[in-house]
Image (cartoon, rainbow, N blue to C red):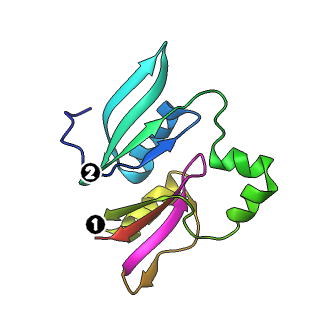
Amino acid sequence: MTEAAPLPDVVPMLSYEDCAAAADWLAEAFGFEEVERFDEDGEVTHVTMRAGHGFVFLGKPGASYVNPKHLREQSQAAARMYEVPWVVDGVWVQVDDVGAHFDHARAAGAQPLGEVEDEPFGRRYRVEDLEGHRWMFVQR
């Protein structure tokens, strides 16, 4: 872990059933850097990750939390909301080489929501992480 830089004015916060596994996976799949990790009684409850010049907080809100992937299994309404390939309540991230990033993320187990596409605003791809959160990566 590295020393924390000053945080930007806006930092996305995502909840995970297994915060420690999510942090490790995000580092492997997306190249994020872990900045700090907190645990309570041996269970990881918060991790701050750096993504380029930005940050994302990962948290474990408690036993009653259900991640997006499991929520879709339990709720028809939630499942319908995620039938589209778009990012629903997700995070937007800039990277240097979106094609290489996509290939690496997919090899690490990310679930593509399509292929790399050229849009008027640039090259991008969309993907789900191990717990069903959606991410959009855009060429810097």
Which label sits in the foreground, 1 or 2? 2
Q: Which mark is residue 9?
A: 2
Pointer 2 local density, CA inside 10 Å: few below 14, some 14–19, many at least 20: few
Q: Which kind of residue does numbered mark 2 sit on? A: Asp
Q: Is residue 9 magenta?
A: no
Q: CA distance from mark 1 to mark 2?
A: 23 Å
Q: Quadrant of the N terminus?
A: top left
When asked about the image quadrant of residue 86, the answer is bottom right
Q: Is residue 81 left or right of residue 132?
A: right
Q: Residue under label 1, please give it.
A: 96
Residues packed near mark 1 inside 10 Å, few (<14), some (14 to 19) or many (20 plus): few
Amino acid type shown at disc 1: Asp
Image quadrant where one finds the C terminus: bottom left
The magenta stretch spans which residues? Answer: 122-134
Q: Residue at x 54, y 65 (%)?
A: 87
Where residue 106 sits: x, y (%)? 51, 59
Classify mark 1: helix, strand or loop: loop
Left or right: 17 with respect to 38?
right
Q: Position of residue 77 (x, y in %)?
A: 77, 58
Horizontal side, residue 71 vs residue 103: left or right: right
Residue 136: mark: none
